[in-house]
Amino acid sequence: MGNLVIVRHGESQWNQQNRFTGWTDIDLTDNGQQQARRAGRALAEAGIRFDLAFTSVLKRVIRSQWLIVDEMDCMYIPVISHWRLNERHYGALTGRSRADVIAEFGEDQVWEWRRGYASRPPLMDRQDARAPARESRYRDIAPDVLPLGESLEDTVARVQVFWQEAIEPVLRQDKNVLICTHGNSQRALVRLLEPRMSDADVARFDVPNGVPLVYRLDRDLRILDRRSLPIAEATSSSIL
């Protein structure tokens, strides 16, 4: 079988500000662009090539994917973008700084929202202008399918649908696949690939910005090998 590589986007502007981002369409910082380029160079140096790429529909991931394949000189590969690979929706916490949320709810509760597998944040109001059903990019999706706040468990269930319908069939065709995504949707993918991992271990799985996680799979999609490519100055966003 081919390789499956999962890469979290480079640092975003709200990562830098330590704000809950979720489905808000925030772009990369200059540092984030460099992180994505370093990921592309590391993949090229490792001799990994891709037949197809998947992304979310948020620009920090889409731009990271562009920069990665640009560095690899393979911008010609097909790309499929889908909302089910979006970041976990942080509900009413969206846009708020971690410090402000801790001041209101306390550190223990915020830690549970960030690292509890089944814990949902307060939901976003349906009438909020930022609610997904009010965005044109989601206009063809039934409003009751779109989240107003998610736990990591919810995110896994949402990603699993796309994994089974779109990603798994491609992997079974011996394709080399790049998935450029977000911290919690990467955790969801790891859970699907490694179902024996505990809820707590999944929730705490380290997801640095711009560090390729490389899986080698057999024909039954069982893991033969998993490794992270070495990247200088790799950092994780503390908001996750």
Image (spheres, rainbow, N blue to C red):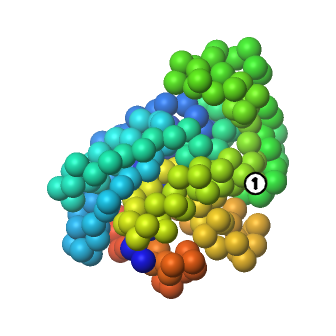
In the picture, residue 192 is in which quadrant?
Answer: bottom right
Q: Nearer the viewer, residue 123 or 146?
A: 146
Q: Nearer the viewer, residue 194 or 22?
A: 194
Residue at 22% across / 49% down in the picture? 76
Residue 205's spot in the image, x, y percent? Answer: 62, 67
Residue at 34% across / 69% down in the picture? 231
Residue 60's spot in the image, x, y percent? Answer: 42, 40
The reply to whether residue 226 is in sight is no
Give the residue at the far bottom of this rendering. 224
Q: Nearer the viewer, residue 61 or 164?
A: 164
In the picture, residue 97 is in which quadrant?
Answer: top right
Residue at 60% across / 38% down in the picture? 22
Residue 212's spot in the image, x, y percent? Answer: 40, 65
Relative to residue 219, is residue 130 drawn left or right?
right
In the displayed structure, 67 sits above or below 137; it is below
Residue at 71% across / 24% down in the picture? 143
The residue singled out by tag 1 in the image is 153
Relative to residue 59, is residue 96 drawn left or right?
right
